[in-house]
Image (cartoon, grey):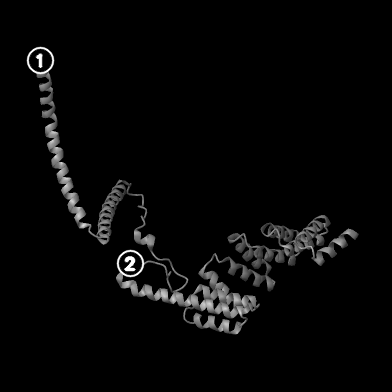
Amino acid sequence: MLKISVLLWMLFTIILVWLPIGIVSFLFSRKVFKKLTRLLSKIDTFDALIRLKREISYIYTTKISVLSSRLRKQKVNDLPKHIPVPHTPTIDDIIKSKPSVSRYADPWMIVDDEDNKDTRTTIIKKRKLLEKIIYDALWLRKDGKLDEYEKKIIEWLAIDAEDKDLNKLLADLYFTMSNYKKALPILKKIVDMDSNDHKAIRQIGEIYLTSGDFDIAELLIQNAIAINPTNPKYYISMVELFYNTDRKPDAITEMEKVIKLRPTNSAYMLTLADLYQEIHDFDNAKKYYFRVLEYEPSNEKAKKKLKELVVE
């Protein structure tokens, strides 16, 4: 009898403890389920889901922005009065458009504002047209129709004189034709647009080198190499400059850098061998003449030079 009474007492205790908890849990779950059902009923389409996501993002960013603003104000208030408050860049500062080389913006930029859709479409059309013009012009050059090529570029530069690509095409044409008088002002304009355009800097250096202004040429070519140290043509320009200023050991040093960049180029190795021969370093001269024959066994100049060195 006592055992039954104890069991009943324990059962009654459990009911008294868990019944209120169960009722509260049920009411809370019902309330949550009701709100969740109401929320899910609104998401009947994919677009509705996207709108909901945007609303949540907006609320979140707004709260974060308000909190950040309060923290900044608190920090500013805590600063001593004699210390200037540093400028905190805003979103507008971060995304502010940089000055463009061309009047046409990046064709792949995203414009969300409905009022700017027409502008975006115009920009893309103009950029595609410009790309077609460049493509057609390059075909004219490939076919050897240089006069038509030059005329086409000049016509479109009249429409957009600040387009870097068109300026580079015209400058490269004049430089290749050794028309340095026309090439130089365009190359300087390109460098004004982009101070890191190493090709234009090197070409200006070559023009000064040709005119005998070696000091300026050296500075310019060194600058081009510093920006792009992987182009062997830039080092070749330095070799030419050092050779013309009677600095053959320096020319050899630069030529060895070229060989490191292009270790299988027999023409470069032949030039280095000739330089070693000129300073009477015959061992290194033989070494590079032999290397020329390894990659180009029929090279008559290397064979002839080796015979001369053996006789000596």
Nearest the eye: 140 or 207: 140
The residue tagged with tag 2: helix, strand or loop?
loop
245 up-or-down from 12: above or below: below
- Residue type (three-letter) at the residue carrying disc 1: Leu
Residue plotted at (79% across, 61% down): 293
Of discs 1 and 2, which sits in the foreground?
A: 1
Quadrant housing the N terminus? top left
- Residue type (three-letter) at the residue carrying disc 2: Asp
Q: Which labelled disc corresponds to residue 112?
A: 2
Nearest the eye: 292 or 271: 292
The residue tagged with tag 1: helix, strand or loop?
helix
Nearest the eye: 83 or 222: 222
Residue plotted at (68% across, 68% down): 214
How many neighbours does mark 2 have within 10 angstroms: few (below 14), some (14-19), or many (20 or more)? Answer: few
How many neighbours does mark 1 have within 10 angstroms: few (below 14), some (14-19), or many (20 or more)? Answer: few
* Residue indicated by mark 1: 2
Residue plotted at (63% across, 81% down): 144
Residue 107 falls in which quadrant of the image?
bottom left
Q: Is residue 296 left or right of residue 131?
A: right
The image shows residue 32 at horizontal and vertical percentages of 17, 46
Q: CA distance from mark 1 to mark 2?
A: 80 Å
The image shows residue 92 at horizontal and vertical percentages of 35, 62
Quadrant housing the C terminus? bottom right
50 up-or-down from 124: above or below: above
Regarding residue 312, the answer to whether it shows in the image is no
91 up-or-down from 23: above or below: below
